[in-house]
Every structure is written in structure tokens, then in C-alpha cells.
Image (tube, rainbow, N blue to C red):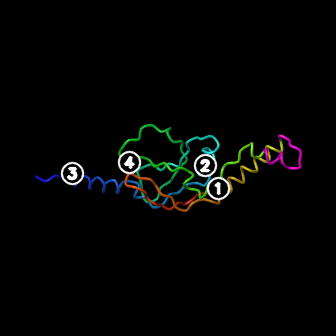
Amino acid sequence: MGDDSDSDAEDNTDERRESGPQRIRALAVTTDDVVTALEANQRRDRNAVLRVTPPFAGRMRARLHLAGTEGEYEGDVQPIHILPERLVHDAPSFPTVDETGDELRTSDEPYTRDKHHKRHAEAVEAWRESVREALADRVTLETPDGPHDVTVNYLG
């Protein structure tokens, strides 16, 4: 009698492709979710990701999520977590309070806490805008069957 293990493995691979992340052609994600996730990770190391949950289809939505906060996921097909840095070309470093304070201390103006607060808020807004301008139009998803490239569409 022949060994059917190769045939079973092929059937499992075909089944995963039909219901798995290889079905995804495009992701929709809000620009604010990408900015918020990136900021949370750079500011506080929060493990923020953009999560895509099964069942998978040609077009999927990626939503802001804190990795590790979900319980067990039923079924063989697991959600996909995308680091926000992967959706931004050359993600800039988040401005620190010390950096913006140093900028004020080296200027000719006298330092005040209010000026420092205002300058830091301006630096953060400029950082957010630079992230919005550097969004990638494609991302590679890591899947059980290997890397899979998809288009990214931004909302908002």
C-alpha cells in the first residue's frame, strides 16, 4: 500500500491557502492607527501592532491592537500582527522631552516651562506629520507559508 502522507500534506497546504492569509490582496488601515501604534511603541514600548483577524478575504482591515492582550484564538488560522514600523518608510525617531528642552536651552530666548511644553507639542505634531507622509503602499505579511506581499490602503 502507498503512503498518503504526501497527499495529506498537499491537501492541508491547499486548504490553508484557501482560508489563510495568502488570500489577502489589500489591507485597509486608518492612518491614525498607524501613527498611534508607532507613537505608543516609541514612547512607551507598548507592543502596539496592526492586527488582521481571520477569516481572511481579498480585502481585509488591520486595526490597532496591543499584542499579547488577546486570549487563545480558536482554529488553525491565527491573526496576523503587523508592526507599525513596517508600514512606514524610514520611521523617524519620536522627539523626546529632553531633546526639545535642549533646543530651547541653546536658543537666545530664556527657557520657560510653558515654552518647553509648546515646543515639545510642536515637535510631536511635526513627527506625526512626517510619519503620515512616509506611509508605505505595500507590506510583506509573514505567514505560515512564507512571506506574502499586499497593497495597503489608508483611511482618514
Q: Are marks 1 and 4 in contact (CB under 8 Å)?
A: no
Q: Position of residue 53 (x, y in %)?
A: 45, 48
Amino acid type of the residue that numbered disc 4 sits on in the rendered structure = Val
Which residue lies under the disc numbered 1? Answer: 131
Q: Which residues are magenta?
A: 101-113
Task: Tell me how far mark 3 sits from mark 1, CA to CA.
Answer: 49 Å
Residue 146 tag number: none
Mark 2 lies on a secondary structure that is helix
From the viewer's perspective, tell me whether residue 44 is left or right of residue 59: right
> What's the distance in space between the residues labelled 2 and 3, CA to CA?
44 Å
Callout 1: helix, strand or loop?
helix
First reached walking from the N terminus: tag 4 or tag 2: 2
Question: Foreground: 74 or 107?
Answer: 107
Q: Which is nearer the N-term, disc 3 or disc 4?
A: 3
Instruction: Give the mark nearest the N terminus, 3 or 1.
Output: 3
- Tell me where residue 144 appears, x and y as whole percent: 38, 51
Q: Tag 3 or tag 2, which sits nearer the N-term?
A: 3
User: Residue 5 shows which numbered tag?
Assistant: 3
Three-letter code, disc 2: Leu
Task: Establish if 75 lies above or below 60.
Answer: above
Q: Residues within 10 Å of mark 3 (few under 14, many from 20)?
A: few
Q: Helix, strand or loop at disc 3?
A: helix
Q: Residue 87 appears at what percent x and percent y?
A: 56, 56
Residues under numbered marks 2 and 3 in contact, where contact means CB atoms less than 8 Å apart: no
- Check disc 3 and give the amino acid type: Ser
Residues at marks 4 and 2, CA–CA distance in whole angstroms: 26 Å
Total of numbered circles in the picture? 4
Q: Residues within 10 Å of mark 4 (few under 14, many from 20)?
A: some
Q: The residue tagged with tag 4: helix, strand or loop?
A: loop
Residue at which label 2 appears: 38
- Determine which of the numbered discs, if any, sits on residue 77 in the image: 4
Mark 1 / mark 4, whichever is N-terminal = 4
